[in-house]
Image (cartoon, grey):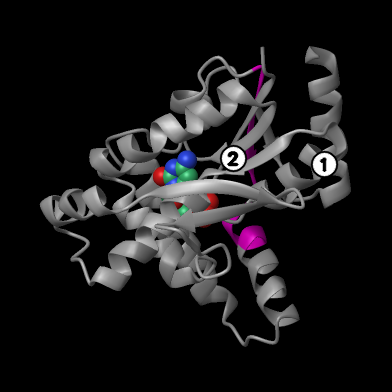
């Protein structure tokens, strides 16, 4: 039986950084489910599909395949045989992923891929509905969050380090809009699972959060 760790939480809470580090320490596979929604979003953007057209989106899904591969332990996202891992990291793609992940057809398309990965490997999987919907029986569930200001600050620092100018208020507004949409959609909204451990990282460093998660996992292993 594989060991599954589910990490959910809002945009910019540090889920991927922390999950990647913990996966390395544990020798688990890190599965970034947001990247799968982003790959589909990139496809919809390239096709020029109207976000509000559920039938357009559902129709487009017939021609699209998203698969996951690993290169030196790094998750690679393959969209119709093209490696789009780096292309999907923009804010525009993230917002499109949030807007299109509300549709049942989009979620259904990715559900079995996510469950199959967890059934076949020890995984740390992050997203919005992993503990509540994708892996309700996960061995460990964490709900990772931080204040929207703190999350905006971290994002701004990341952009600054890449030499990209940004406005922290605009980033915070964007984060809040995305959270609202992800929390209030009808299907599989972002929500803390009843049996998830709540971790507010606003005043915690990355190492401390990883150590905390390692301690939680060790107790269950
Ligand atoms: O984690 P992220 O920023 O890469 O995710 C992009 C969007 O994808 C997010 O705003 C909502 C959607 N998503 C989702 O609906 N369910 C998931 N398990 C992961 C992401």
Mark 2 close to ligand 1, CB under 8 Å = yes
Is 65 on the left-hand or right-hand side of 21? left
State yes or no: residue 141 in magenta: yes
Vertical order, 157 against 213 (above or below): below
Q: Which mark is nearer the camera, 2 or 1?
A: 1
Question: Measured from the top left, where is residue 99 in percent x and y?
Answer: 32, 56
State yes or no: residue 27 in magenta: no
Question: Which residue bears the numbered disc 2?
Answer: 126
Question: Measured from the top left, where is residue 33 in percent x and y?
Answer: 52, 44
Question: Measured from the top left, where is residue 157 in percent x and y?
Answer: 72, 73
Which mark is on residue 24? Answer: 1
Q: Does any portion of residue 172 appear in the rendered image?
A: yes
Q: Does any portion of residue 192 appear in the rendered image?
A: no
Quick one: 62 or 172, which is closer to the camera? 62
Is 195 on the left-hand or right-hand side of 22? left
Q: Earlier in the sequence, mark 2 or mark 1?
A: 1
* Residue beneath the point at 60% across and 19% down: 138
Q: What residue span does the magenta drawing correspond to?
A: 139-151
């Amino acid at each position: 039986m594989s060991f599954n760790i589910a990490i959910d939480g809002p945009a910019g809470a540090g889920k991927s950084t922390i999950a990647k580090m913990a996966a390395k320490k544990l020798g688990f596979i890190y599965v970034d489910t947001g990247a799968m929604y982003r790959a589909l979003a990139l496809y919809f953007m390239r096709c020029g599909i109207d976000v509000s057209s559920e039938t357009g989106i559902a129709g487009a899904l017939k021609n699209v395949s998203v698969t996951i591969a690993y290169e030196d332990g790094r998750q690679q996202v393959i969209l119709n045989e093209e490696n789009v891992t780096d292309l999907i990291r923009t804010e525009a793609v993230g917002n499109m992923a949030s807007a299109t992940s509300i549709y049942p057809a989009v979620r259904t398309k990715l559900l079995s891929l996510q469950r199959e990965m967890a059934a076949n490997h020890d995984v740390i999987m992050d997203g919005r509905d992993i503990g509540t919907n994708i892996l309700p029986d996960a061995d460990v569930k964490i709900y990772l969050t931080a204040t929207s200001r703190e999350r905006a600050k971290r994002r701004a620092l990341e952009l600054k380090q890449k030499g990209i100018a940004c406005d922290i208020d605009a980033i915070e507004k964007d984060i809040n809009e995305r959270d609202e949409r992800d929390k209030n959609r009808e299907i599989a909204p972002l929500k803390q699972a009843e049996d998830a451990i709540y971790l507010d990282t606003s005043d915690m460093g990355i190492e401390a959060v990883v150590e905390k998660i390692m301690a939680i996992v060790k107790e269950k292993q």
